Image (tube, rainbow, N blue to C red):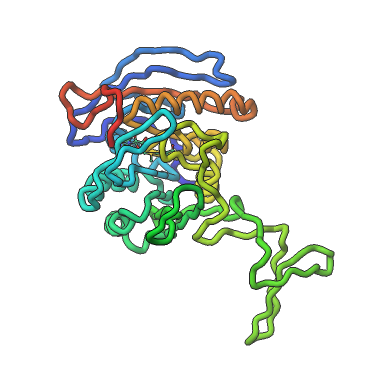
Amino acid sequence: MPSSRQVAPLAWGGSPLAPPRWQLVQRLEGPRLASAVETSASYADPPARAAPADLLVAGDSLRLAQAWTPGSLSCVYIDPPFGTGTVRRGRGHDYRDVEDDPEPFVQWLSPWLAASRDCLCATGSLFVHLDYRAVHYVKVALDRIFGRDHLVNELVWCYSVGGKSRRGFGRKHDTILWYARGKDWAFYPEAVRIARRGGSHMRVVLDEHGQQVQEKTDRKTGRVYRYPVAAGKIPEDWWTDIETLNHSDRERTGWPSQKPERLLERLLGATTVAGDWVADWFCGSATTAAVAQRLGRRFVTADRAREAVALAQARLARRFAELPGVAEAAPPLEVWHESAPEGDPANPTTSQRSSA
Ligand SMILES: C[S@@+](CC[C@H](N)C(=O)[O-])C[C@H]1O[C@@H](n2cnc3c(N)ncnc32)[C@H](O)[C@@H]1O
């Protein structure tokens, strides 16, 4: 199995930026967080621990990604700012996206891509979630960082909620680039099978056991192919069965650009097993962490916006309490705040509003 089962101690990784100080502000112990403790310990280097907790960090995640133990993660999913140049508004929360200029955007994002590759174990995978604005630029950067032949899939996630265009077709898909660290990446397709839909080119008939099967006949060879409907199928690389969150969705936290948990369930389910470590360097409302927690994966996630981290903390604590089965077995959750040296322009975490 991948080396992701090893502990993932934090150690300062030699970033060109001055090392920050890290503060452990809360440690939440299961079950049901009964023994939550507040702590104000401050470290120049967070200590390596024998049995590390899941981590939620407030601060610039690049420092964290570069400091993370190389080869220790099974999956990294990132849903970074898309480079829209706008303020992304949610319900009561917002964050400033990076400038709408693809070249600087790629330059800005590339250190996270390189750090993510280094953190992945030999069988690990990186998912980079983007839209039409910058995906082609970032794909070239990823080809350079991982190697072109390490692109596993260009996943197209389609949805229909949201505004329509009168001047063109509605832009209703995002692209998720999947790159593998090595040639022998982990893939568990059986964990993410989906229902077979009717209305395809195949006819539905009953087989000799009375089970529904989709059936097609190869015209050239005459060979008959049969697929049991109940067994479902492995999804293609375009997904239309996961709708984006609508305004009244129960999952909604109010954080802008929140992604649906089902999307993360598919990505994590397809590439990790229980106990594997997962990272999301652009946490937002902690969708990745919430799904990882529910599926029994370990996680590290971070956001420079303190507001996002507060939302994430509440979401993870709530989920922890709501899922007693999970909580019994769940590792502790630690919440860290990073405070960079005074005057470090890369650290806006002391300001009220986030900016990307
Ligand atoms: C698109 S949102 C992520 C949404 C998330 N996937 C969810 O489901 O809620 C991008 C996030 O990246 C954060 N961010 C931007 N620059 C960052 C940085 N340098 N370090 C950490 N987080 C950053 C923003 O504050 C924002 O919350």
The residue shown at (71%, 61%) is 229
- For residue 44, what is the image quadrant? top left
* Residue 197 in view: yes
Quadrant holding the C terminus = top left
Residue 181 shown left or right of residue 157 in the figure? left
Image location (x, y in percent) of residue 353: 30, 27
Image location (x, y in percent) of residue 197: 66, 61
Image location (x, y in percent) of residue 173: 44, 55
Residue 125 shown left or right of residue 326 in the figure? left
Across the whole image, how many numbered discs are drawn on residues? 0
Give the vertical position of 236 relative to 42 (above or below): below
- For residue 76, what is the image quadrant? top left
The residue shown at (27%, 46%) is 109
* Residue 178 in view: no
Ligand 1 is located in which of the four quadrants?
top left
Residue 290 shown left or right of residue 78 in the figure? right
- For residue 223, what is the image quadrant? bottom right
Residue 141 shown left or right of residue 77 in the figure? left
Give the vertical position of 92 relative to 260 (above or below): above
